[in-house]
Amino acid sequence: MAYSNNVFINCPFDQDYFPLLRPLLFTAIYCGLNPKISQTTDSDNVRVEEIKKLIYDSKYSIHDLSRIEPKSQTDLPRFNMPFELGIDVGCKTFSSRKDKRYLVLEEKPYRYKEVLSDISGQDIKAHESKPINVVKAMRDWIKGLKADKKIDNYQIIWETYNEFYYDYETELRKDNMNPDNIWEIPFSELIEIIKT
Amino acid sequence: MTASGAKLKMRMAKAAKSRSNRVHVISRINGWVVKKEGNKKASTRVIPTKEEAVLEAQNMVENGKASAVIVHRKDGKVGG
């Protein structure tokens, strides 16, 4: 799919975030966008090159900064998400991709002002770690960018997602797979399944 | 896509097109709704509590308007 429908997803790809990632991917696809995510497991150099390409090839981006804090006192802060947001801002600023648009998601309203005040003035929405809020934030942002496109309200999308997820859980369990396990099926397959 | 992924995709497509008579109890920001599977919009007004919504869904089954109740959690998953 072309640049104009691609949406780069910058978020943690871990078990804790999976309940938010699923509706995020679902809403993007429901609203006609094509999610692009990095699944590279090679060297760090290859990974950053892939991320730069995905960002350059995506008109839209979602940057979720809600999980940048250390998970425990012995963990370190997670810089990947703000780093990739920085690459995106740089891409828009210094390349020909001046029409790029990005949404920054946060857990709590205005926390970004304490940790990343440079992004003030951008599209920033708080989801409070609630999947329904992710759907609403995504849908309303996309509708704002594509005002002339008919897009169902967030309630319809959320309810359709619930139905989808019931089928998804049921079918995975038939194959003795755990739908809660983020690595049970590749993201590329999850995206293809949502598209059905 | 792997062969198992392709099969799963086919089964999901079939499930999405099937017209069961189930109803789903689904959260909203301000409460809960009951939605008949396949319908675009919820079948009920917003109901304040999950328990009341489940009762309403069960009434639909008892009255022959639905075949089964699927209760979702606030994260969209089923059960709990």
Image (cartoon, coloured by chain):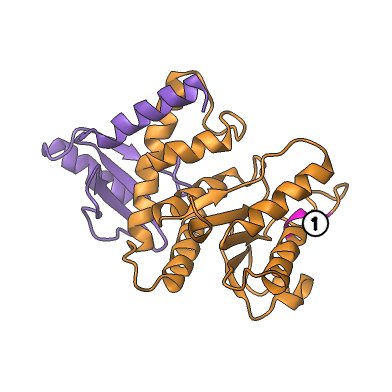
Farthest residue in the bottom direction?
A: A121
Q: Quadrant of residue B9?
A: top left
Q: Is A136 one of the magenta-colored residues?
A: no
The answer, for residue A60, to whether it is visible in the render is yes
Q: How many marks?
A: 1
Residue toward you, A50 or B53: A50
Point out residue B42 in the picture as x, y percentages from the top left corner: 25, 54
Q: Mark 1 falls within which chain?
A: A
**Picture residue at 46% right of the left edge, 71% below the top:** A145
Q: Is residue A80 above or below residue A168?
A: below
Of the residues shown, which amino acid type is indicated by label 1? Phe
Look at chain B in the picture and name its colour.
purple
Badge 1 is on which residue? A79
Side of A192 relative to A17 (left or right): left
Query: Mark 1 Cα within 10 Å, few/some/many (few <14, many 20+)?
Result: few
Of all residues shown, which one is farthest toward the left? B64
Q: What residue is drawn where x is 57% and y is 38%? A: A187
Task: Please determine whether, in this image, residue B20 is positioned above or below residue B73.
Answer: above
Q: Colour of chain A?
A: orange
Q: Quadrant of the C terminus of chain A?
A: top left
Foreground residue among A80 and B46? A80
